[in-house]
């Protein structure tokens, strides 16, 4: 991706196509273990912001949020989708770590993280209920909001090479 001129917008578009499809599969194939692991991941994220202040380690919070996405992709039960997601993971994680460095306002940071936790919890409820259509629609909206929030206009044309350069 670094040598092909792939843009960050392209990476986020790919994620917004594959993750909702994987969520629908997860809703159909979920196991009690999948649900427990996903819920534990969200619980860990929530613990980082439950004190009301900004997490001391935003990078740890960002890695935890990425772990949630990884679990969704792994547990969907489609190895090809999981592998494709892992190809994008390094780019997304690097971008997220850079993007969250700008979260200077503690109150705004907690608000953003709290909204993300609510979205994760809603997804878990839909998946637990086996609502594949609802889960897919929710995750599509989630991914679109995330892309708008994390990828302002001035970064849409930035390339993967720019990110690592």
Image (cartoon, rainbow, N blue to C red):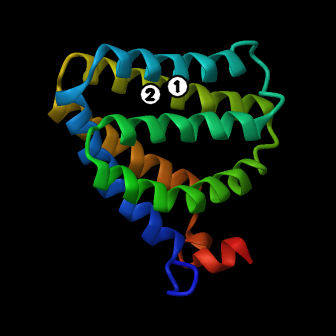
Side of 163 relative to 10 (left or right): right
Residue 129, relative to residue 68: is it above or below? above
Badge 1 marks a residue whose secondary structure is helix
Rendered residue at 37%/49% (across/down)? 82
For the residue pair 127 and 81, the one nearer the viewer reads as 81
Rendered residue at 53%/55% (across/down)? 89
Rendered residue at 28%/43% (across/down)? 22
Q: How far apart are marks 2 and 1 (CA)?
A: 5 Å
For the residue pair 118 and 21, the one nearer the viewer reads as 21
Side of 24 relative to 124 (left or right): left
Q: Can residue 151 be seen in this view?
A: no
Side of 33 relative to 128 (left or right): right
Which quarter of the figure is the C terminus placed in? Answer: bottom right
Q: Quadrant of residue 52?
A: top right
Q: How many marks?
A: 2
Q: In which quarter of the image is residue 151?
A: bottom right
Rendered residue at 15%/35% (across/down)? 133
Question: Which percent across, then down, holds residue 90?
Answer: 59, 59
Packing grade of label 1 (10 A; few <14, some 14-19, many >=20) is some
Circle number at residue 40: none
Side of 98 relative to 20 (left or right): right
Check whether the beta carbons of the residues at disc 2 and disc 1 lie within 8 A of each other: yes
From the image, tell me which residue sits under label 1. 117
Packing grade of label 2 (10 A; few <14, some 14-19, many >=20) is many
Question: Which percent across, then down, holds residue 54?
Answer: 78, 27
Q: In which quarter of the image is residue 18?
A: bottom left
Question: Which percent across, then down, holds residue 64?
Answer: 62, 33
From the image, tell me which residue sits under label 2. 120
Q: Is residue 85 visible?
A: yes
């Amino acid at each position: 991706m670094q040598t092909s001129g792939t843009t960050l917008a392209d990476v986020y578009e790919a994620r917004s196509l594959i993750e909702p499809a994987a969520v629908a599969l997860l809703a159909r194939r979920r196991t009690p273990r999948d649900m427990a692991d996903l819920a534990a991941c969200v619980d860990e994220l929530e613990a980082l912001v439950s004190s009301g202040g900004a997490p001391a380690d935003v990078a740890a919070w960002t890695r935890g949020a990425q772990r949630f996405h990884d679990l969704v992709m792994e547990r969907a039960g489609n190895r090809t989708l999981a592998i494709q997601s892992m190809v994008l993971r390094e780019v997304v994680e690097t971008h997220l770590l850079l993007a969250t460095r700008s979260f200077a306002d503690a109150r705004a940071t907690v608000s953003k993280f709290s909204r993300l936790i609510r979205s994760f919890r809603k997804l878990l409820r839909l998946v637990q209920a086996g609502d594949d259509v609802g889960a897919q629609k929710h995750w599509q909206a989630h991914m679109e909001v995330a892309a708008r929030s994390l990828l302002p206009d001035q970064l849409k044309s930035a390339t993967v090479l720019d990110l690592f350069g």
